[in-house]
Image: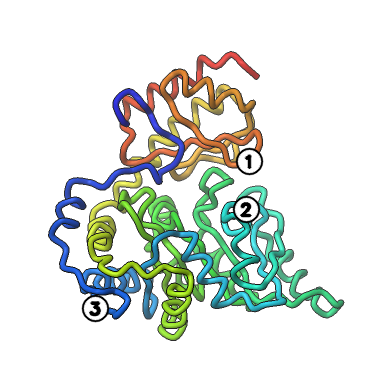
């Protein structure tokens, strides 16, 4: 909370903790473009170890991490299969087509899950003069479906179909906490995996892309082409190390609070995008609800026309949740 504002627009609005600020001030730095920033190197090594991958690359944003994966694995003139509402398809300002030369083949994802049969059908269509798929993109948690956590067995089943897999794990930490498994178990079937530090983990900037050493070396070159070299980035990486060490387990608190918000929403609007298991509530409602909530000091966001999103995070406490619940309950519109 900031003053009298309960900001539920996104978990990207979190601010770095005091421990992160101290670590940033004291960080040992070097020129990361030369591979000489020891704090960045430490973060990349810690992240790769945590996800069970050979190597990792620190990048400014989750979108850049996803776009690097598309450049690495989505070959020109092929198809990239992904959920129709996934972030990489719907929320990256058309970057996929610009950066990879591949085209998206969106498939149904109404409950946050992809049907293996739809993936196999897209692959089989290549025998009938359709473009050949080169990559399958998965997302966990699945943001538009109330942050649904996609579990390890489902990820493994989809990966077993045979395409390289990029896992958009912007909130993979939330999925791991909700399901009760290590992140590496979720990441194991994926060729590449991206996770954000600047959402629920409260770091001010940064995401990481992990995979095999040769892929990450190639990703480093593409990062430079996209202008993603950050020089003395250890100041930022220091906060990321604190985030990995101190902020993952506490995500359960965000999940508990989101369930409370989801209960209030369910009583007011019946159309909620699935059970609330992580830190998101998405629901169909009149767009005027956003203005109503703002008038009551609660900031909400939208992810599509008529689809409202409320996101809990470190900077909203129980008092803020109660204020949001009261604001939801008193809405008199449709």
Q: Residue 82 lies in what quarter of the image?
A: bottom right
* 257 to 252, vertically: above or below: above
The residue located at (27%, 55%) in the rendering is 243
Q: Are marks 1 and 2 in contact (CB under 8 Å)?
A: yes
Q: Residue 323 lies in what quarter of the image?
A: top left
- What separation in Å lies between label 3 and label 2 (alpha carbons)? 36 Å
- Please identify, in this view, whether the residue under mark 3 or under mark 2 is nearer the observer: 3
The residue located at (24%, 53%) in the rendering is 246
Q: Position of residue 207 (x, y in %)?
A: 39, 61
- Left or right: where 103 falls relative to 210: right
Which quarter of the rendering shows the N terminus?
top left
Q: Which residue is mark 3?
A: 36
- Left or right: where 242 falls relative to 227: left
Sequence order check, earlier mark of 3 and 1: 3
- What separation in Å lies between label 1 and label 2 (alpha carbons)? 10 Å
Dot 3: element = loop
Q: Position of residue 266 (x, y in %)?
A: 56, 28
Q: Which residue is mark 1?
A: 304
The residue located at (41%, 22%) in the rendering is 297
Q: Which mark is residue 90?
A: 2
Q: Position of residue 159 (x, y in %)?
A: 58, 72
How dense is the environment of label 1, judged by Cα within 10 Å: few (below 14), some, or many (20 and up)?
A: some
Sequence order check, earlier mark of 3 and 2: 3
């Amino acid at each position: 909370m900031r003053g009298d504002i309960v900001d539920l627009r996104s978990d990207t609005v979190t601010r770095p903790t005091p421990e992160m600020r101290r670590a940033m001030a004291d960080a040992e730095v070097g020129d990361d473009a030369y591979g000489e920033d020891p704090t960045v190197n430490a973060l990349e090594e810690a992240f790769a170890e945590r996800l069970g991958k050979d190597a990792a690359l620190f990048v400014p944003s989750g979108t850049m991490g996803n776009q690097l994966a598309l450049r690495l694995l989505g070959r020109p003139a092929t198809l990239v299969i992904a959920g129709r509402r996934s972030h990489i398809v719907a929320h990256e300002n058309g970057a996929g087509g610009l950066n990879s030369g591949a085209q998206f083949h969106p498939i149904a994802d109404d409950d946050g899950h992809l049907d293996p049969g739809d993936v196999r059908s897209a692959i089989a269509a290549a025998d009938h003069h359709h473009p050949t798929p080169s990559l399958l993109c998965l997302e966990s948690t699945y943001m538009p479906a109330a942050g649904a956590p996609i579990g390890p067995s489902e990820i493994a089943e989809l990966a077993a179909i045979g395409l390289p897999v990029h896992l958009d794990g912007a909130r993979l930490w939330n999925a791991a906490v909700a399901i009760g498994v290590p992140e590496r178990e979720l990441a194991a079937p994926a060729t590449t995996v991206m996770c954000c530090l600047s959402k629920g983990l409260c770091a001010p900037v940064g995401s990481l892309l992990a995979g095999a050493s040769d892929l990450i070396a190639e990703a480093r070159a593409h990062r430079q082409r996209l202008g993603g070299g950050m020089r003395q980035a250890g100041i930022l990486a220091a906060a990321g190390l604190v985030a990995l060490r101190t902020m993952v387990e506490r995500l359960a608190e965000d999940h508990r609070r989101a369930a409370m918000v989801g209960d209030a929403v369910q009583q007011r609007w019946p159309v909620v995008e699935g059970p609330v298991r992580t830190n998101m509530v998405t629901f169909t409602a009149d767009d005027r609800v956003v203005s109503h909530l703002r008038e009551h000091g609660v900031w909400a966001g939208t992810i599509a026309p008529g689809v409202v999103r409320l996101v809990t995070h470190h900077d909203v406490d129980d008092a803020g949740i109660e204020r949001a619940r009261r604001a939801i309950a008193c809405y008199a519109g449709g």
